[in-house]
């Protein structure tokens, strides 16, 4: 008779660790998790961070891929931008599941 491997058993009662948005630091619902490449894939980036869909959309509405690769390749660099700071202070007041379409804005040069 085969032996049961109890170490491989995962209890159904154990909840997964919540994923926290790297930009706004709110918990991300599982249906809104998006990975953001700190340097865009088109520019050779491989490192990803989890973001809310709304936070991810806002970053890409504000910056071009070239800007993200050159000047905004870390979360701390992105957070230094005044428009992003304003967005983050606004979105932090929203519940974790809040989702709103980012405005289509002209990207800054």
Image (tube, helix red, strand yellow):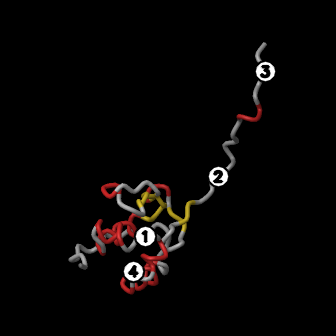
Q: CA distance from mark 1 to mark 3?
A: 47 Å
Q: Nearer the viewer, mark 1 or mark 3?
A: 3
Residue 65 point in image, percent of width and height:
29, 65
Circle 4 packing at 10 Å, graded few (<14), some (14-19), many (20+), is some
Q: Are marks 4 and 3 in contact (CB under 8 Å)?
A: no
Q: CA distance from mark 4 to mark 2?
A: 32 Å
Instruction: State which quarter of the image contains the N terminus.
Output: top right
Q: Residue at x 68, y 49 (%)?
A: 14
Q: Nearer the viewer, mark 4 or mark 1?
A: 4
Apparent side of residue 103 relative to residue 68 in the rendered image (left or right) = left
Dot label at residue 15: 2
Q: CA distance from mark 1 to mark 2?
A: 22 Å
Q: Secondary structure at mark 4?
A: helix
User: Which residue in the protein does label 3 denote?
Assistant: 3
- The image shows residue 95, relative to residue 85, as above or below, that is above
Q: CA distance from mark 3 to mark 2?
A: 27 Å
Q: Residue at x 39, y 83 (%)?
A: 81
Q: CA distance from mark 4 to mark 1?
A: 17 Å
104 or 31, nearer to the observer: 104
The quarter of the picture where residue 78 lies is: bottom left
Apparent side of residue 35 relative to residue 109 in the rendered image (left or right) = right
Which badge, 1 or 3, is on the more N-terminal residue? 3
58 or 99, nearer to the observer: 58
Circle 2 packing at 10 Å, graded few (<14), some (14-19), many (20+), is few
The quarter of the picture where residue 107 lies is: bottom left
Dot label at residue 84: 4
Which badge, 4 or 1, is on the more N-terminal residue? 4
User: Which residue in the protein does label 1 denote?
Assistant: 98
Q: Residue at x 31, y 68 (%)?
A: 60
Residue farthest top in this picture:
1
């Amino acid at each position: 008779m085969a032996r049961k491997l109890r170490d491989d058993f995962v209890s159904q009662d154990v909840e997964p660790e919540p994923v926290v948005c790297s930009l706004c630091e709110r918990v991300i619902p599982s249906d809104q998790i998006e990975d953001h490449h700190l340097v865009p894939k088109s520019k050779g980036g491989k490192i990803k961070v989890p973001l809310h869909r709304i936070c991810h959309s806002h970053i890409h509405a504000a910056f071009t891929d070239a800007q993200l690769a050159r000047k905004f390749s870390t979360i701390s660099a992105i957070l230094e931008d005044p428009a992003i700071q304003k967005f983050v202070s606004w979105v932090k007041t929203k519940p974790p599941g809040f989702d709103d379409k980012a405005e289509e804005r002209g990207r800054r040069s």
